Amino acid sequence: MTAVVQLKIKPEEDGLRLDRWFARHFPQLTHGRLEKLLRTGQVRVEGARVKANHRVAEGQTVRVPPLPISSEVVQAEKPKPKISAKDRSLIEDLVLYRDSEVIVLNKPAGLAVQGGTKTERHIDALLPALAREGEDRPRLVHRLDRDTSGVMIVAVTARSAAALANAFRARDTQKIYWALTKGLPLPRSGKIDASLIKRAAADGRERVRIANQDEDEEAKSAVTLYDVIETATTMAWVALMPLTGRTHQLRAHMAAIGTPIVGDGKYGGEPSRSHGEIPNRLMLHARRLRIRHPKGHYLDVTAPLPPHMATVWDMFGFDKNDKRDSFKE
């Protein structure tokens, strides 16, 4: 491209993040270069400066500046890695439900959703294996932490991706997680309403934490409902329902009330680390997702516990098929 162009957002792109819109239309543009174009106002939406996470709307105009082919802009194209028979079998075995619009997976703990530094094997890289003849590769519409297992929905088409993104943004969803906590939450059910802020910790790793009053402008509101289902010794089986979708929200909130999730060394520290027969792995599972389907009805899918949590549930005599999911505000 050697001149500024104005591109219209298509109906199937409604609700898409701007950085993802660029990834579709200009895959050669690095994210870092896009951020620079946004900071300097060279990329605009409807004439206004925006950020990479801005959600575009159907009919809006995106200003795209000249994008010369240079080493600064273009990522060296790498051959697409082939998906091994083992990985193809893995991703196929994770499917809980699929139709012409959506695929629902039971993500295993320990497998990242997207790539990053030194992370080449992840859900996004395996999704092409689920594409049927004549279909595009399925698209991510939300994420789970690497160490969190459970229900995860992906879109089969661009239009269904936009519809699902709208459902998440409008909170037309209900997400229920199961966790094992170190300590017994009191009261046994309640609401945690505590804004979160992201900061670098003493060890240099970035964490979210409860915001102080003087940090309100930078903080993001975060609300979680919780309900204790059963207890065993000094641990509790807790159902969690986030009303907002902040990074590490459930882990930070449970640690903040003094009952960190077992196996969460990042937020729980020493008190959350398990001992004896309990595996030292994060005990957090996305148990159930209820979301408006792109065709208008509601889709409700439940995922069985991962092996490391199922072992603990059996050890304590918890009912892995329990269906309680009521919450009191």
Image (spheres, rainbow, N blue to C red):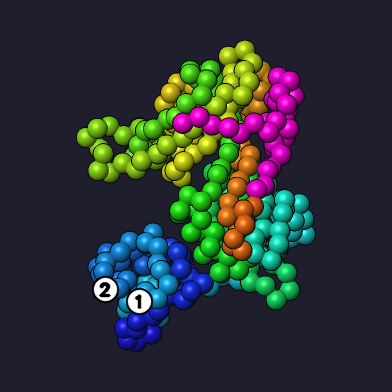
Residue 107 visible in the current orientation:
no
Residue 24 horizontal/vertical position (percent): 50, 72
Query: What residue is at 51 percent from the left and 51 percent from the top?
Result: 172
Q: Secondary structure at mark 1?
A: strand
Relative vertical location of residue 75 with respect to residue 220 in this rendering, above or below: below
In front of the other: 38 or 32: 38
Q: Quadrant of residue 150?
A: top right
In front of the other: 328 or 124: 328
Residue range of the region highlighted in magenta in the rendering? 300-329
* Quadrant assignment for the N terminus: bottom left
Q: Are marks 1 and 2 in contact (CB under 8 Å)?
A: yes
Q: Earlier in the sequence, mark 1 or mark 2?
A: 2
Query: Residue 142: which disc?
Result: none
In front of the other: 247 or 99: 99
Residue 183 horizontal/vertical position (percent): 53, 17
In the picture, measured across the screen, residue 317 lies left or right of residue 272, that is right
Label 2 belongs to which residue?
A: 47
Magenta residue check for 325? yes
Label 1 belongs to which residue?
A: 61
Query: What residue is at 73 percent from the left and 20 percent from the top?
Result: 317
Residue 68 horizontal/vertical position (percent): 37, 81
Residue 320 visible in the current orientation:
yes
